């Protein structure tokens, strides 16, 4: 998805510096939606409850006639969620439009019992890897 977003913008602005990113949440072979309804969010949270899942973040950068891409994988495990916790989270509205129906940078942080990999990837943009790609294009200094 990140590569497709990048290509669409580069086609209209071929000399621009373009950064595109997208994330998906996967449980086993299932890709969870970006929750748009309470029912979708509730189903995502019920599926994630007590389970490990992957957050796959794609980044693509175009600059100086070059394209760099990277896929970043983060493993996350949720504790077993009680119905009340899911209900309260649904009421917060934080889930809306979020891959897998949650935003780790908000209330859902309390659901995470394990994380391996890039936290910022789960938030939505893997910062370390993005900076490394920018640096490979000569576009970032050594300071974060």
Image (cartoon, rainbow, N blue to C red):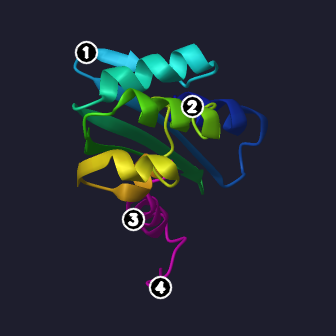
Question: Of discs 2 and 1, which sits in the foreground?
Answer: 2
User: Which mark is on residue 90?
Assistant: 2
User: What residue is pinned by disc 4?
Assistant: 143
Cα separation between marks 2 and 1: 25 Å
Answer with mark 4 or mark 3, whichever residue precedes in sequence.
3
Q: Are marks 4 and 2 in contact (CB under 8 Å)?
A: no
Q: Nearer the viewer, residue 33 or 135?
A: 33
Answer with mark 4 or mark 2, whichever residue precedes in sequence.
2
User: What residue is pinned by disc 1?
Assistant: 29
The x and y percentages for residue 41 are 52, 23
Residue 51 versus residue 123 in the image, above or below = above
User: Of helix, strand and loop, which one carries label 3?
Assistant: helix
Q: Are marks 2 and 3 in contact (CB under 8 Å)?
A: no
User: What residue is pinned by disc 3?
Assistant: 128
* Residue 127 is covered by the magenta coloring: yes
Q: Which residues are magenta?
A: 124-144
Estimate how packed mark 2 is, as few (under 14), some (14 to 19) or many (20 or more) residues with alpha carbons within 10 Å. Answer: many
User: Which mark is on residue 79?
Assistant: none
The x and y percentages for residue 32 are 42, 20
Cα separation between marks 1 and 4: 38 Å
User: Of helix, strand and loop, which one carries label 4?
Assistant: loop
Report if residue 52 is visible in the image: yes
For the point 29% across and 29% down, the residue is: 49
Answer with mark 3 or mark 1, whichever residue precedes in sequence.
1
Estimate how packed mark 1 is, as few (under 14), some (14 to 19) or many (20 or more) residues with alpha carbons within 10 Å. Answer: few
User: Of helix, strand and loop, which one carries label 2?
Assistant: helix
Question: Of discs 3 and 1, which sits in the foreground?
Answer: 1
Report if residue 67 is visible in the image: no
Estimate how packed mark 3 is, as few (under 14), some (14 to 19) or many (20 or more) residues with alpha carbons within 10 Å. Answer: few
* Residue 30 is covered by the magenta coloring: no
């Amino acid at each position: 998805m990140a590569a497709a977003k990048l290509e669409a913008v580069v086609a209209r602005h071929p000399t621009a510096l373009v950064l595109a990113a997208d994330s998906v949440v996967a449980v086993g072979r299932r890709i969870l939606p970006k929750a748009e309804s309470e029912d979708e969010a509730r189903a995502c949270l019920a599926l994630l409850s007590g389970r490990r899942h992957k957050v796959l973040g794609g980044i693509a950068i175009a600059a100086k006639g070059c394209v760099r891409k990277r896929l970043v994988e983060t493993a996350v495990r949720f504790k077993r969620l009680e119905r009340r916790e899911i209900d309260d989270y649904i009421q917060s509205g934080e889930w809306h439009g979020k891959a897998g129906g949650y935003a780790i940078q908000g209330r859902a942080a309390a659901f995470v019992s394990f994380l391996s990999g890039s936290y910022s990837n789960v938030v939505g943009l893997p910062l370390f890897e993005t900076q490394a790609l920018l640096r490979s294009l000569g576009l970032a200094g050594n300071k974060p």
